[in-house]
Each structure stands twice: as structure tokens, then as C-alpha cells.
Amino acid sequence: MVLLLRKAKRVKLAFERSGDTLEGTFLVIDTETTRYKWRGSEGQFPNYQPLIPTEFNSTTQLDTVEALKAVNTLKATSDNPKDFSVDLTIGGGQVIMANTDEKGEAIITADTDGEGFMRVSGSQLADVLKAFGGMVDFQLTNAYSPMLFSSDGFQVVVMPIASDKSAKQHKADKEAKEAEARNEAKNEAEGEAIEAEQTEPIAEAEREAIEAEAVLEAIAEGIAEAENDWQTEAEAVLEAEAIAELEAELEAKPKRSRKRDKVAVA
């Protein structure tokens, strides 16, 4: 089939539906002489979304035709044309493609935003450029993360090949993240210490205020008890004085004589 498609001058790709499910959908490829038809099938596909990068440090737009020519030139100068790697250096309005053995180099003019480096498989890069055709955008995060090619909603992820530059960058980024984490932990600890220092005087003042309030309550209770005792004593004194006055009055009154006058009887 691959050989027939390569020989075809015209290829038409379409979908035919005969139902509401994926199993009722057919993929149809037409050439001048042959029609290929595949039935779709329902299934649980892997979650590929996390593999697609979303944050980038550089964005480049280039012509795939010129880039493919450069890749083919590097392939011809490589010691192993079937399995060769290409170093991509981006920045300054150009993309530099070079063999890893430094036997060839090609410079392509491109629209660049930011700088970046990545080592990729030359054959895989050629396949991606052929699949897109025309202008294509590709974006880099760093030398050790996937690279994203995109055009008209079509996306292809290209994995990097390990290199000395990618190892150094990965180490530097890791150390930077660890240092940032340590600084965050230090700042958090310092913040907690400052908060504790600020909270301690407040707690001490609150404790003193509670103790002072308790003392005032005790004094108020003592005063209330003293007032009650004084009032009780005062009432007792008044009552005693009243009784004494009453007894004095009774003693001061003259006593009535109980003797009766004699009455004469005729």
C-alpha cells in the first residue's frame, strides 16, 4: 500500500459515515487507480494530552521545504545516513542545523521569538517536515523537553535526543528549582518566626489583661462583701438602739395604782 501511495499523483482522503458510532465510520483513500477503505472501531485510547507541551521559551516559523533541503544535505554528509542526529540552534532570526559530528551545517532564515537548542533524530525531523509542507510553527521549552510542531490545528510532538547541552541544562534547571524551593522554605520559616514574635507580646498582654481583670473582680467581690457586712452590722445597731429607746420610754412612764377607795354603805 505504501508503494502504491508513493506512486500516486493524486490522493484524496475522506470519511464515510453509515451510522452514529465510530464503527459506522470509514476512512477512505482514493488514488487514480485504487480505493482503500477502513472501518473505524470504538475503544479506550490512551490519554495523550499530558504529553503535549503547553509552556514554551521560544517559537519559530519556517518553510518546511527549505528545512527539508537542509536536513537532506546533513544526511548526505553524515557517517550514518540511516540513523543520524541534527542539532537545532534557534535565535536571531535563523535556525542553524548541524550534524552532531560537525561535518555539516545549514542556516535557514526564519521568524524566531526567543532562543533554544535541541538535538533530534534527523529521519524523524524529515518525516515531520514532509507531513506538514509549507509554513510550520515549532516551539521549544528547553533542550530536554518535547518540541511541538503545529499548523492549521495539526500537531506533532518530537522527542529530544540526550546531549551534553541538554544534560547541563537539565542539571542547571534542577539546581535552580531546588534553590528556589529552599528559599521558599526559608522565607516561610522566617515568616512564621516573625509572626510568632509578633504574636507573643500580644499573648502576654492578653494574659496580663486577664489577670488584672481577675484581680479587679476579686476586689469588687471583697468590697461587695464588706458592704453587705457593714449594712448587716448597721441594721443590728439600729435595731438595738430602737429596743433600748423603747425600754427607756417604758421605764419613764408613771405606774398606775391598783388600790380602790372604800365605799360607805348606808
Image (tube, helix red, strand yellow):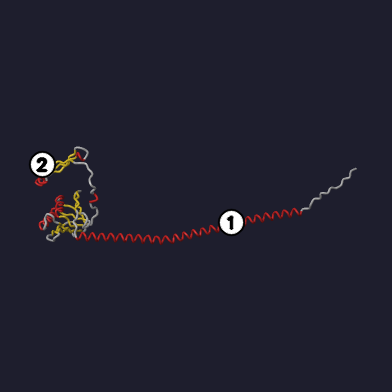
Q: Position of residue 24 (x, y in %)?
A: 19, 39
Instruction: Look at label 2 and name its amino acid.
Output: Thr
Mark 1 closeness class: few <14, some 14–19, many ≥20 residues within 10 Å? few
**On the rendered image, what quadrant is the N terminus found in?**
top left
- Give the quarter of the image for residue 116: bottom left
- Give the quarter of the image for residue 22: top left
Residue closer to the observer: 153 or 220: 220
Label 2 vs 1, first from the N-terminus: 2
Q: Position of residue 37 (x, y in %)?
A: 14, 41
Instruction: Look at label 1 and name its amino acid.
Output: Glu
Q: Residue at x 21, y 60 (%)?
A: 167
- Give the quarter of the image for residue 74: bottom left
Q: Position of residue 33 (x, y in %)?
A: 9, 41
Residue closer to the observer: 93 or 103: 103
Number of numbered tags placed on the structure image: 2
Mark 1 = which residue? 225
* Horizontal arrangement in the rendering, residue 124 relative to residue 176 (left or right): left
Mark 2 = which residue? 34
* Horizontal arrangement in the rendering, residue 149 relative to residue 254 (left or right): left
Mark 2 closeness class: few <14, some 14–19, many ≥20 residues within 10 Å? few
Secondary element at image label 1 = helix
Q: Position of residue 110 (x, y in %)?
A: 17, 56
